[in-house]
Image (tube, helix red, strand yellow):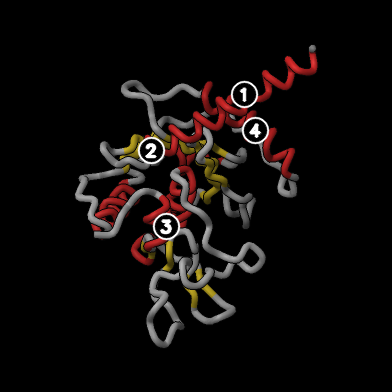
Amino acid sequence: MWRRLRIAILLLILLFVALNTYFDRVYSTDWDTPLRIVAYPIAADDSEVTDRYIRQQSATAFQHIETFFEQEAKEYGLQMERPIRLTLTPPLSQSPPPLEPRAGRLSVLLWSLRMRYWAWRVDAPAGPAPDIKLFILYHDPAISPSVPHSVGLQKGLFGVVHVFADSGMRGSNETVIAHELLHTLGATDKYDLRTNQPAHPDGFAEPDIDPLYPQSFAELMGGRIPTSATESTTPESLQQVIVGAKTASEIGWKKR
Protein backbone atom coordinates (compact mmCIF):
# COMPACT_ATOMS: atom_id res chain seq x y z
CA MET A 1 0.00 0.00 0.00
CA TRP A 2 2.73 2.46 1.02
CA ARG A 3 4.73 1.56 -2.07
CA ARG A 4 1.75 2.35 -4.32
CA LEU A 5 1.19 5.61 -2.47
CA ARG A 6 4.82 6.67 -2.97
CA ILE A 7 4.62 5.81 -6.67
CA ALA A 8 1.39 7.78 -7.00
CA ILE A 9 2.94 10.82 -5.30
CA LEU A 10 6.01 10.58 -7.54
CA LEU A 11 3.82 10.39 -10.64
CA LEU A 12 1.87 13.46 -9.53
CA ILE A 13 5.10 15.37 -8.98
CA LEU A 14 6.38 14.38 -12.43
CA LEU A 15 3.05 15.38 -13.98
CA PHE A 16 3.16 18.75 -12.22
CA VAL A 17 6.74 19.40 -13.40
CA ALA A 18 5.88 18.37 -16.97
CA LEU A 19 2.80 20.62 -17.10
CA ASN A 20 4.66 23.49 -15.51
CA THR A 21 7.48 23.15 -18.04
CA TYR A 22 5.00 23.02 -20.93
CA PHE A 23 3.16 26.16 -19.87
CA ASP A 24 6.46 27.96 -19.15
CA ARG A 25 7.56 27.22 -22.70
CA VAL A 26 4.27 28.23 -24.32
CA TYR A 27 3.98 31.45 -22.32
CA SER A 28 7.61 32.53 -22.72
CA THR A 29 7.70 32.06 -26.51
CA ASP A 30 4.29 33.32 -27.63
CA TRP A 31 5.75 36.85 -28.02
CA ASP A 32 2.44 38.58 -27.40
CA THR A 33 4.10 40.89 -24.89
CA PRO A 34 7.74 41.71 -24.11
CA LEU A 35 9.52 39.28 -21.83
CA ARG A 36 10.51 40.70 -18.46
CA ILE A 37 14.04 39.61 -17.53
CA VAL A 38 15.61 40.42 -14.18
CA ALA A 39 19.41 40.29 -13.92
CA TYR A 40 20.93 39.82 -10.47
CA PRO A 41 24.65 40.75 -10.30
CA ILE A 42 26.63 38.61 -7.86
CA ALA A 43 30.31 38.82 -6.88
CA ALA A 44 31.83 35.38 -7.43
CA ASP A 45 34.93 36.27 -5.42
CA ASP A 46 36.11 38.69 -2.71
CA SER A 47 38.05 40.90 -5.12
CA GLU A 48 37.73 44.68 -4.80
CA VAL A 49 37.87 44.80 -8.59
CA THR A 50 34.76 42.65 -8.85
CA ASP A 51 32.90 44.60 -6.17
CA ARG A 52 33.73 47.94 -7.78
CA TYR A 53 32.79 46.72 -11.26
CA ILE A 54 29.37 45.50 -10.11
CA ARG A 55 28.56 48.64 -8.14
CA GLN A 56 29.52 50.94 -11.00
CA GLN A 57 27.13 49.31 -13.47
CA SER A 58 24.37 51.61 -14.62
CA ALA A 59 20.69 50.76 -14.99
CA THR A 60 21.25 50.63 -18.77
CA ALA A 61 24.14 48.16 -18.54
CA PHE A 62 22.33 45.60 -20.70
CA GLN A 63 20.77 47.95 -23.23
CA HIS A 64 22.91 46.43 -26.00
CA ILE A 65 21.30 43.04 -25.36
CA GLU A 66 17.81 44.53 -25.63
CA THR A 67 18.74 46.28 -28.88
CA PHE A 68 20.32 43.12 -30.29
CA PHE A 69 17.18 41.03 -29.75
CA GLU A 70 14.94 43.78 -31.12
CA GLN A 71 16.98 43.93 -34.33
CA GLU A 72 17.22 40.16 -34.70
CA ALA A 73 13.50 39.65 -34.03
CA LYS A 74 12.65 42.05 -36.86
CA GLU A 75 14.61 39.81 -39.24
CA TYR A 76 11.98 37.16 -38.51
CA GLY A 77 8.95 39.42 -38.77
CA LEU A 78 8.47 40.23 -35.08
CA GLN A 79 7.81 43.96 -35.12
CA MET A 80 7.93 44.60 -31.39
CA GLU A 81 9.82 47.34 -29.62
CA ARG A 82 12.16 45.76 -27.07
CA PRO A 83 10.77 42.19 -27.10
CA ILE A 84 13.15 41.50 -24.21
CA ARG A 85 13.34 43.99 -21.34
CA LEU A 86 16.20 43.57 -18.90
CA THR A 87 16.10 45.05 -15.42
CA LEU A 88 19.29 45.21 -13.35
CA THR A 89 18.87 44.79 -9.60
CA PRO A 90 21.25 45.91 -6.86
CA PRO A 91 24.02 43.39 -6.14
CA LEU A 92 22.86 40.15 -4.56
CA SER A 93 24.88 39.09 -1.53
CA GLN A 94 24.06 35.37 -1.72
CA SER A 95 25.33 32.97 -4.36
CA PRO A 96 23.32 30.20 -6.04
CA PRO A 97 23.98 26.53 -5.21
CA PRO A 98 27.18 25.43 -6.99
CA LEU A 99 27.14 22.80 -9.73
CA GLU A 100 30.13 20.47 -9.71
CA PRO A 101 32.06 20.58 -13.03
CA ARG A 102 31.82 16.81 -13.63
CA ALA A 103 28.42 16.22 -12.07
CA GLY A 104 26.50 13.17 -13.30
CA ARG A 105 22.89 13.17 -14.42
CA LEU A 106 21.48 12.53 -10.94
CA SER A 107 23.63 15.28 -9.42
CA VAL A 108 22.56 17.70 -12.15
CA LEU A 109 18.90 16.82 -11.55
CA LEU A 110 19.22 17.37 -7.80
CA TRP A 111 21.08 20.63 -8.39
CA SER A 112 18.33 21.75 -10.76
CA LEU A 113 15.68 21.17 -8.11
CA ARG A 114 17.72 23.00 -5.45
CA MET A 115 18.41 25.81 -7.87
CA ARG A 116 14.76 26.22 -8.81
CA TYR A 117 13.81 26.49 -5.14
CA TRP A 118 16.67 28.93 -4.49
CA ALA A 119 15.70 31.10 -7.47
CA TRP A 120 12.06 31.10 -6.40
CA ARG A 121 13.03 32.45 -2.97
CA VAL A 122 15.04 35.36 -4.39
CA ASP A 123 12.99 38.54 -4.24
CA ALA A 124 12.15 40.28 -7.48
CA PRO A 125 12.02 44.07 -7.96
CA ALA A 126 8.76 45.88 -7.37
CA GLY A 127 6.27 45.59 -10.19
CA PRO A 128 5.09 42.70 -12.37
CA ALA A 129 6.74 39.34 -11.66
CA PRO A 130 9.68 38.60 -13.98
CA ASP A 131 9.34 35.95 -16.66
CA ILE A 132 13.01 34.95 -16.38
CA LYS A 133 15.68 35.41 -13.71
CA LEU A 134 19.35 35.62 -14.66
CA PHE A 135 21.94 35.29 -11.90
CA ILE A 136 25.14 36.83 -13.26
CA LEU A 137 28.28 35.91 -11.36
CA TYR A 138 31.22 38.25 -11.97
CA HIS A 139 34.83 37.06 -11.68
CA ASP A 140 38.01 39.11 -11.40
CA PRO A 141 40.07 37.93 -14.44
CA ALA A 142 43.27 38.37 -12.44
CA ILE A 143 42.02 35.67 -10.06
CA SER A 144 40.04 33.54 -12.52
CA PRO A 145 41.49 33.53 -16.07
CA SER A 146 38.66 31.14 -16.97
CA VAL A 147 35.20 30.85 -15.48
CA PRO A 148 32.83 27.93 -14.80
CA HIS A 149 30.36 26.81 -17.43
CA SER A 150 27.19 28.90 -17.56
CA VAL A 151 23.74 27.31 -17.50
CA GLY A 152 20.35 28.43 -18.79
CA LEU A 153 17.36 26.22 -17.96
CA GLN A 154 13.91 26.34 -19.47
CA LYS A 155 12.59 24.33 -16.53
CA GLY A 156 12.25 27.11 -14.02
CA LEU A 157 13.12 29.90 -16.48
CA PHE A 158 16.42 30.94 -14.93
CA GLY A 159 20.07 31.17 -15.86
CA VAL A 160 23.34 31.08 -13.94
CA VAL A 161 25.85 33.04 -16.01
CA HIS A 162 29.58 33.39 -15.31
CA VAL A 163 31.30 36.46 -16.78
CA PHE A 164 34.32 38.69 -16.16
CA ALA A 165 34.41 41.87 -14.10
CA ASP A 166 36.28 43.71 -16.84
CA SER A 167 34.89 46.56 -18.95
CA GLY A 168 37.10 45.44 -21.83
CA MET A 169 35.16 42.15 -21.94
CA ARG A 170 31.70 43.69 -21.82
CA GLY A 171 30.94 42.66 -25.39
CA SER A 172 31.85 39.01 -24.88
CA ASN A 173 30.01 39.04 -21.54
CA GLU A 174 26.86 40.25 -23.30
CA THR A 175 27.18 37.44 -25.84
CA VAL A 176 27.35 34.83 -23.08
CA ILE A 177 24.34 36.37 -21.30
CA ALA A 178 22.31 36.43 -24.53
CA HIS A 179 23.29 32.79 -25.25
CA GLU A 180 22.12 31.56 -21.84
CA LEU A 181 18.97 33.66 -22.03
CA LEU A 182 17.95 31.84 -25.20
CA HIS A 183 18.55 28.51 -23.45
CA THR A 184 15.78 29.47 -21.01
CA LEU A 185 13.49 29.90 -24.05
CA GLY A 186 14.26 26.47 -25.46
CA ALA A 187 17.14 27.20 -27.84
CA THR A 188 19.71 24.40 -28.09
CA ASP A 189 23.49 24.52 -28.35
CA LYS A 190 24.78 24.34 -31.90
CA TYR A 191 28.43 23.49 -31.39
CA ASP A 192 30.46 20.33 -30.86
CA LEU A 193 30.75 19.85 -27.10
CA ARG A 194 34.14 18.18 -27.52
CA THR A 195 35.82 20.88 -29.61
CA ASN A 196 33.59 23.96 -29.10
CA GLN A 197 33.52 24.28 -32.88
CA PRO A 198 30.19 25.54 -34.31
CA ALA A 199 28.21 22.76 -36.00
CA HIS A 200 27.38 23.20 -39.66
CA PRO A 201 24.85 24.28 -40.84
CA ASP A 202 22.74 25.42 -37.84
CA GLY A 203 25.68 26.78 -35.82
CA PHE A 204 26.89 28.98 -38.69
CA ALA A 205 25.72 32.54 -39.27
CA GLU A 206 26.15 32.10 -43.04
CA PRO A 207 25.98 28.36 -43.73
CA ASP A 208 25.57 28.72 -47.50
CA ILE A 209 28.34 31.10 -48.52
CA ASP A 210 31.13 29.91 -50.81
CA PRO A 211 33.85 29.64 -49.72
CA LEU A 212 32.47 28.60 -46.34
CA TYR A 213 35.49 29.91 -44.41
CA PRO A 214 36.24 32.27 -42.89
CA GLN A 215 32.87 33.37 -41.55
CA SER A 216 32.36 36.99 -40.50
CA PHE A 217 29.76 36.41 -37.79
CA ALA A 218 28.85 33.94 -35.06
CA GLU A 219 25.47 32.27 -34.73
CA LEU A 220 24.41 32.97 -31.14
CA MET A 221 23.92 29.34 -30.11
CA GLY A 222 26.93 28.24 -32.16
CA GLY A 223 28.90 30.55 -29.92
CA ARG A 224 31.95 31.28 -32.05
CA ILE A 225 33.01 32.63 -35.45
CA PRO A 226 34.34 29.75 -37.60
CA THR A 227 37.57 30.71 -39.36
CA SER A 228 38.37 27.23 -40.68
CA ALA A 229 37.13 23.66 -40.35
CA THR A 230 39.07 23.31 -37.10
CA GLU A 231 39.39 26.85 -35.73
CA SER A 232 37.07 29.59 -34.53
CA THR A 233 37.22 32.84 -32.58
CA THR A 234 35.13 34.37 -29.82
CA PRO A 235 32.97 37.31 -30.94
CA GLU A 236 34.03 40.57 -29.33
CA SER A 237 30.48 41.93 -29.18
CA LEU A 238 26.91 41.24 -30.24
CA GLN A 239 27.61 43.24 -33.41
CA GLN A 240 29.41 40.11 -34.62
CA VAL A 241 26.50 37.79 -33.76
CA ILE A 242 23.20 36.81 -35.38
CA VAL A 243 20.30 34.53 -34.46
CA GLY A 244 20.13 31.74 -37.03
CA ALA A 245 16.97 30.28 -38.56
CA LYS A 246 16.99 27.08 -36.48
CA THR A 247 17.45 29.01 -33.23
CA ALA A 248 14.74 31.49 -34.22
CA SER A 249 12.33 28.60 -34.85
CA GLU A 250 13.13 27.06 -31.46
CA ILE A 251 12.20 30.24 -29.60
CA GLY A 252 9.04 30.90 -31.59
CA TRP A 253 10.27 33.39 -34.19
CA LYS A 254 8.93 32.46 -37.62
CA LYS A 255 10.51 33.77 -40.81
CA ARG A 256 8.05 35.54 -43.09
Amino acid under label 3?
A: Thr
Gap in angstroms between the C-alphas marked 1 and 3: 30 Å
Gap in angstroms between the C-alphas marked 2 and 4: 25 Å
Where disc 2 sits, the SS reads helix
Q: Quadrant of the N terminus?
A: top right
70, 54: nearer the viewer: 70
Q: Is residue 138 visible?
A: no
Gap in angstroms between the C-alphas marked 1 and 2: 22 Å
Q: Position of residue 226 (x, y in %)?
A: 49, 75
Amino acid under label 4?
A: Pro
Gap in angstroms between the C-alphas marked 1 and 4: 22 Å
Amino acid under label 1?
A: Ile
Label at residue 247: 3
Decide: marks 1, 4 in contact (CB < 8 A)? no
The residue drawn where x is 25% and y is 44% is 82
Question: N-terminal of the two: label 1 or label 2?
Answer: 1
Q: Is residue 93 left or right of residue 56?
A: right
The residue drawn where x is 73% and y is 15% is 5
The residue under label 4 is 97
What crowding class fits label 3: few (fewer than 14 Cα within 10 Å), some (14-19), or many (20 or more)?
A: many
